[in-house]
Image: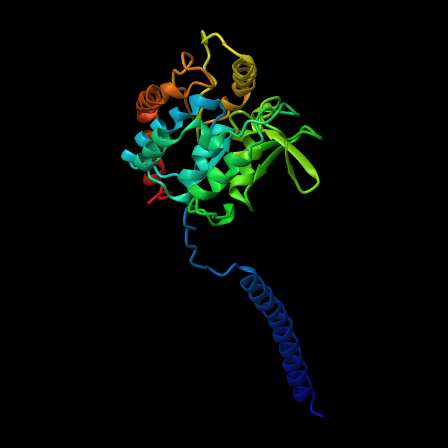
Amino acid sequence: MIPLQKSFLRRRGMTTIRKEKKRKPLALMAVLLAALASCVPQTKEVRPSAPSPAKIALVLGAGAAKGFAHVGVIKILESNRVPIHMIVGTSVGSVVGSFYAYGYDAFQLQKLSFSIERGDIVDLVLPDNGFIKGEKLEEFVNRTVQNTPMEKLKIPFYAVATDVQSGEEIAFGRGNTGMAVRASCAIPGIFRPVRIGDRMYVDGGVVSPVAVEVARRFGADVVLAVDISARGERTPPENTIETILLSFNIMYSRLASAQIAKADVVIQPKVSHIGSADFSKRHEAILEGERAAIEALPQIQRIVNDLRTAGRLE
């Protein structure tokens, strides 16, 4: 081969090698860029989730004949269109609560409260673990709600009782409405304990006279608690039943303090002058309920308006 051709080929070969050496870094860079591009997150449209609907619970406390005040509270809440999504009742609160959950409006409740007589709900027996059997109360409640079971009431409703064997708070939300209310109202020493299944139950006020925690447990965002345990000077008792009821009312007052501290709004009708067994002052109790609810109304309306602004209430 001519020396010139050899020289040319060597130069050409060297040029080819140099070009290949230049191409390799470029190819590697392209692979790296492609890999990096694949790691870039894809842009997706993120839609804000709708706010969860708020649940407002009405918690009606224990207090025997003072419980007519609950009717007055409901009158004010209803007339001001305060929505109620859950009702929790203890003792007399469970009676009023079951009727409201069934669908009676406030004025129907008031009419019913004026027509009820002691004989409609009290079946006295010879003292044997209680003066009152409680069957009449159960029948009265079931008749008034047309035998509707708890789970089919228009507003979710829970009746609070005490398992006397374990001392635990029990919230009934299914089954026989009248029986659950009877258990919730079975004040020890006055009403006979109520057997449901293999357990015995007494008045829910023994552990939770104003059952705020029950409402929270079942999903309440806002709790309106009605405390009728009547702090202050009380009417002196005149017989054994009134003495027992007054003693329980003092206990209710002490126990209620811990629970109402957890409520968003506390409504406390001034019913200390009304005896726990005094049905003659039912009209006064209703008026006191109205007054107490009117006093609490600005606070309730602020909460409701804030929830509506946040899109959590219609």
User: Is residue 52 or residue 253 the one in the foreground?
Assistant: 253
Residue 98, position as x, y percentages in the image? 45, 38
User: Is residue 24 or residue 290 the one in the foreground?
Assistant: 290
Colour setup of the view: rainbow
Q: Is residue 160 visible?
A: no
Q: How many marks?
A: 0
Most distant residue in the left direction:
79
Residue 109 is drawn in which quadrant? top left
Residue 309, position as x, y percentages in the image? 32, 39
User: Compared to 272, does 64 lie above or below?
Assistant: below
Q: Is residue 293 visible?
A: yes
The C terminus, quarter of image: top left
User: Is residue 312 or residue 218 the one in the foreground?
Assistant: 218
Question: Residue shown at 48%/31% (left/top)?
Answer: 121
Question: Residue shown at 41%/15% (left/top)?
Answer: 274
Q: State left or right for residue 77 relative to residue 24.
A: left
Question: Residue shown at 49%/35% (left/top)?
Answer: 88
User: Compared to 242, does 150 lie above or below?
Assistant: below
Residue 119, position as x, y percentages in the image? 46, 29
Q: State left or right for residue 190 relative to residue 95.
A: right
Residue 304, position as x, y percentages in the image? 34, 35
